[in-house]
Image (cartoon, rainbow, N blue to C red):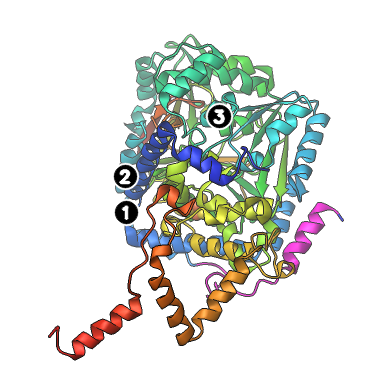
Amino acid sequence: MSTTTGSFQQRSDVAIQDKKLRANFLSAMDGLMEKRDLAFDDKTQLEALRILGAQVRQNALVKLPELLVELETKLTQRGVQVHWAQTPDEAVDIIQSITLKEKAQKIIKGKSMVSEEIHLNDKMEQVGVTCLESDLGEYIVQLAKETPSHIVMPAIHKNTAEIADLLHEKTGIERKEDALYMTEQARQQLRKNFMEADIGLSGVNFAVAETGTLCLVENEGNGRLTTTVPKTHIAIMGIEKVVEKLEDTAPLLSLLTRSATGQPITTYFNMISGPRKENELDGPETVHLVLLDHGRTQMYQDDELLDTLRCIRCAACMNHCPVYTRIGGHAYGFTYPGPIGKILMPHLEGLDDTQSLPTASSLCGACAEVCPVKIPIPDLLVRLREEANHPNPQDSYIKGAGIKRHGMEPVLWSMWRWWHQRGTRYHIMTSMLTKLHFLQPSKLAPWTNKRTLPKMAKKSFHQQMKARTDRLKKGALR
Amino acid sequence: MNARQAILDKLQQSSLKRIGDGDVIPDRPGFQVMQRERKSNAQLSQQFENMMAKVKGEVIRVPQEELESRLNAIIEAKAIKTLLLSPESPYKASFSGLLDEVRIYDKAIESWKEALFNDIDAAITSTLGGIAETGTLVLWPSVSEPRLMSLVPPIHIAILYESQMQPTFWHFMHHHNWSEGMPTNALLISGPSKTADIEQTLAYGVHGPKELVIVLVEE
Ligand code: SF4
């Protein structure tokens, strides 16, 4: 499901002309890039750590079915209820039935991109259950009735003045362009909700099969409150988030926080291995884990596409992406924006609905250069472009393959190939084109809307080279 | 077919041929990059202190024999009126003169949620140890020191022994054999709670403690 209307082209066209939005993203991304760079001062160590990060994730993926069963067994032994969902609807059903059983009215939420993926807040609203976001960025985005524009910093598209307006308007606090004041006000507003909520819902950063442990990375403490105060905790994660051993979390955590915000570590690393025990005095009485597929098993069918599942959602790829920096997160129109979104969303929603995403890249490679788990994002983009033009979609793993292959394009390309396969034909064509250069149209929309059209040379490259060689032979340039 | 079986079937039926970028990964990746040069406890605790200072964690070095009197001084300096302690805390009696009230966390949260959220100024907890490289406290909340002690009160005072310092998280979990079994909740804490969600401006004390005081005990 697309989150905004219009095509990607239309949305990015609007976004790129929004000066305030561009300024907000430009300064934010500049800051995040610098912080990441400073956090990895030793580049040799960084490289070694990235290799380990990639191996740890790859190791988990290779053993994925076994590890998921091990995780389920360990968690069940510890009293956690594990649920499996193939689709967002199934995940929503599971959560709705837990809510019903608990007679819950209010859910307090820690940050979870998977819950965004299944549009949980809207779906719960439909059955009369309120979901309240407690991460400050998510809280802001929810008050504005928007979706996150960044996977780590959900409200990055707004500047302080806009947030001051919003909080003043929606919560009645004084309008002050002061981040400290606004943060304190939000603390007060949310504290009551932590006490009252029946259920706390969170995401999961890593799930350890070895010990049956759910790990959450955060700075604010809202994740800890969400998973500790309400009497029920529901965690939701994509099936790829599992790792084999507890020690695997150490390099991943170090890579994640430094890549995301340049922090050596976040304020909290919260490791949950079960509900409150018999004589313990706090913590949830019931813990549920929802494991979501939603296109992940599709990526798992192919060695190259599998790399997508290594992702630890650090957002470094979007922070360093020249396209993301200019159009922001909403223009993509899907839950996950930026480079990771472009390689992930086609599997979640099908290439038919997401066909523009893999083309929204100059393939500059900045994303792959910074990715802490070395996902070859540009290669995957090229692969998805090929899949979108697949001549025999039935042979592809990917839903919506072949969607872009239509009309004259394949015919034109086969003519192109025919022309290029023989020297004589090729020479006749280029010399004709250069002779007829004056017939070249001056406008080629949409290409020329933003660019000047390159002029066809009066002499072809071959002709120029030949003339040069002839001159050389005569000794003219000696 | 149920969802569980369908997902596992799809994963098992996959025709994955190679691993990673063409090279076969050994059964377990090598963790050499996590290894560190040997350092003394004093060096580690210095590194810990430097890192904590960067995230506004207040480190106070205290010789073992002065621990109690220095805790008194901290309570006075911070004007703490209501203090939350574990039922096993050895200091229950010693602070009473300074405080309006000493509360002991000895009953389930449900029966006194409001008071915990609204009335307590500070809590003192123990720690399992510290991590030098990131300036991190390690806590294993327990029956006598429940999870919310280090989370809800605005000031968290943590007692850390210099001898319990490890270079990295990886060293720490191996040293303490964590893979053998984890408690219901284990925590790494690095500074007071914070956010940068408003235009990347750093603001401390969002949902968790506003101040983190580490009493670093030198033995
Ligand atoms: S693709 Fe790589 S850089 Fe992008 S979010 Fe995932 S792990 Fe981070």
Question: Is residue A108 visible to us here?
Answer: yes
Q: Which mark is residue B47?
A: 2
Q: Amino acid at mark 1?
A: Lys
Total labels drawn: 3
Image quadrant in which you'd find residue B152: top right
Q: Residue visible at 29% across and 78% down? A: A464
Question: Is there a contact, CB below 8 Å, between mark 2 and mark 1?
Answer: yes
Cα separation, mark 2 vs mark 1, equals 10 Å
Q: Amino acid at mark 3?
A: Val
Which SS class for mark 2? Answer: helix
Image quadrant in which you'd find residue A311: bottom right
Residue in front for this viewpoint, A445 or B209 = A445
Q: Residue visible at 47% across and 23% down? A: A163
Residue in front for this viewpoint, A116 or A79 = A116
Q: Which mark is residue B39?
A: 1
Q: Position of residue A84 (x, y in %)?
A: 76, 49
**Relative to B50, residue B215 above or below:** above
Q: Position of residue B58 (x, y in %)?
A: 35, 30
Q: Amino acid at mark 2?
A: Gln
Q: Position of residue A190 (x, y in %)?
A: 57, 21
Which residue is label 3 attached to?
A: A141
> What range of the chain is rendered magenta?
B2-29
